[in-house]
Image: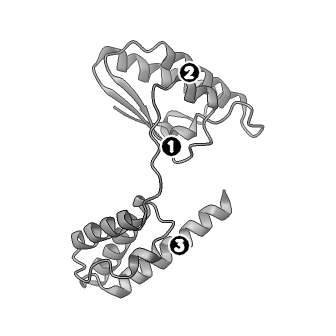
Amino acid sequence: MRVELDSLVPSFLGETGDNLRKVFDLAEESRCVMLFDGFDVIARPRDDGQEHGEIKRVISSFMQMAGGYNGRGMLVATSNRQHLPDPAVWRRLDDMLLYDMPDAGRRRLLLGRRLAAIGYTAGPGNLTGRTRGFSAADIAGVCEDAMRRAVLAGRKVGGDDIEWAMRERRRRKRAIKAGA
């Protein structure tokens, strides 16, 4: 069961806890894996001065419900921000898996597979070094963007599509970093 946390948090105060309770009740009734994707939407530090009372109540509710969960399944939470969630939330989780950024060898492997999948036959070549600081998702995004650009232009993926996608990905990464 995938729980989209951004849709769980409605615009009306007080409803989020009720929605969360419904999710846990459903999970108690069936054998499932509950995936809370984008967990940082609700698991922000409770002492964050920018958060209003609703999010603080949701965090507390989640911790109580997770702590009392007796279902036959398992709870999985994902976040791109390992330092953002409330430390008390992390203490209630059984385990935490951290994925580091891929090294050059892993990036070369990812590039090779992704480029082959989109029909780019030149291989990773010198792209590996230029993807330093890229996550696996960034590399996948570069290849998908290059493919999309080529398809819309009615041609096979070429080096210019890859170059364009690399520039766009770097631009997006800078914009995200500047906004963080």
Q: Quadrant of the N terminus?
A: top left
Q: Seen in the image, is 156 located left or right of residue 133?
A: left
Distance from disc 3 to disc 2, alpha carbons, whole Å, reads 37 Å
SS at circle 2: helix
Asked if residue 170 lies left or right of residue 109, the reply is right
Q: Residue at x 33, y 73 (%)?
A: 148
Q: Residue furthest right?
A: 49
The local secondary structure at tag 1 comes to loop
Along the line of sight, the residue nearer the viewer: 154 or 44: 44
- State the count of labels: 3
| Circle 3: residue type | Arg
Secondary element at tag 3 = helix
| Disc number for residue 148 | none
In the drawing, does residue 43 fall left or right of residue 103? right
The image shows residue 7 at horizontal and vertical percentages of 49, 38
Residue at the spot 49% in from the left edge and 79% down from the top edge: 167
- Residue designated by label 2: 63
Marks 1/2: CA–CA distance: 16 Å
Say the numbered circle drawn on residue 170. Answer: 3
Q: Are marks 3 and 2 in contact (CB under 8 Å)?
A: no
x and y percent of residue 6 in the render?
Answer: 51, 40
| Residue drawn where x is 56% and y is 25% of the image | 91
Image spot of residue 135 (x, y percent): 45, 60
Q: Earlier in the sequence, mark 1 or mark 2?
A: 2
Q: Is residue 16 above or below residue 156?
A: above
Spatial CA distance of label 3 from label 1 is 21 Å
| 3 or 1: tag closer to the N-terminus | 1
Image quarter for residue 108? bottom left
Residue that label 1 marks: 79
First reached walking from the N terminus: tag 3 or tag 2: 2
Q: Nearer the viewer, residue 12 or 107?
A: 107
Q: Amino acid at mark 1?
A: Ser
